[in-house]
Amino acid sequence: MKEKAKRFAEKAHEGQYRKVGNVPYVTHPIRVATFLEKNGASDELICAAYLHDVVEDTPIEIEEIEKEFGKAVADLVRSHTEDKSKSWKERKQHTLDILKKASSEEKQLIVADRFDNLLSLEKDIKEQGQAVWDIFNAGYEDQKWYNEGIAANMDQGLAQEDRPAFFDDFTAAVKRIFH
């Protein structure tokens, strides 16, 4: 099922590129899925990682994800899909609100997605400097608010034994970038 989800994402994101550089967009969900797999995630969570931006950024509807990959995968994707009709700040506040009461797998998906984006951002800043901030919908201060909010809320309601080690790596990246 994981390979099917990867192929589905590759097809869905065909022709899309990351905001910085001429990098195919699908490299992001592939990195998120690979990262979660290396950290012991379930097959459903790995599939959801491949598919996490499909509904948000392509014409594909959540019902098609559910039909192809089942309710568990669709529910994870649904929990992480933003309503693009809302402002950037409203969408991010919604994610922070969800994160507070999310399941362990939902939290892992949100944090792994943000972590990959932060590592890409860190690389872009090293290569291109502070001008990178001008490319995004939200600048340094808004990005700082959002990422610090993720770090502050990701542990809420999560038992210590369910807390993945990479949450510490995410917090360290937030501190490095938004010092």
Image (spheres, rainbow, N blue to C red):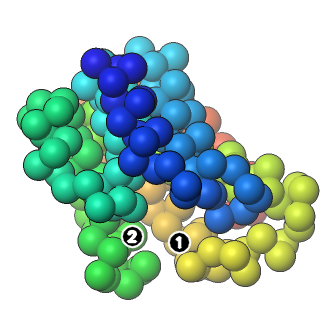
Residue 91 in the image, given as x and y percentages of width and height: 34, 73
Q: Looking at the image, which residue is at 39% across and 47% down?
A: 12
Q: Can you say whether 77 is above or below 108 in the image?
A: below
* Pointer 2 with pointer 1, Cβ within 8 A: yes
> Which quadrant of the view contains residue 126?
bottom right
Q: Is residue 35 visible?
A: yes
Give SS at disc 1. helix
The x, y position of residue 77, in whole percent, is 26, 45
Q: Nearer the viewer, residue 92 or 11?
A: 11
Q: Residues within 10 Å of mark 2 (few under 14, many from 20)?
A: many
Amino acid type at image mark 1: Trp
| Vertical placement of residue 9 versus 153, above or below | above
| Residue 111 seen from this side | no
121 left or right, relative to 18: right
Mark 1 neighbour class, 10 Å CA radius: few under 14, some 14 to 19, many 20 or more? some
Query: Where in the figure is residue 178, as x and y percent of width and height?
Result: 70, 63
In the picture shown, does residue 45 fall above or below 151?
above
Which residue in the protein does label 2 denote? 92
Q: What's the amino acid at mark 2? A: Lys
Q: Residue at x 82, y 60 (%)?
A: 125
* Label whose residue precedes the other's in the sequence (2 or 1): 2
User: Quarter holding the C terminus?
Assistant: bottom right
Residue found 59% across the figure and 40% down from its top: 27
- Identified at 89% across, 67% down, the residue is 129
Q: Nearer the viewer, residue 156 or 66?
A: 66
CA separation in Å, label 2 and label 1: 10 Å
Q: Which mark is residue 145?
A: 1
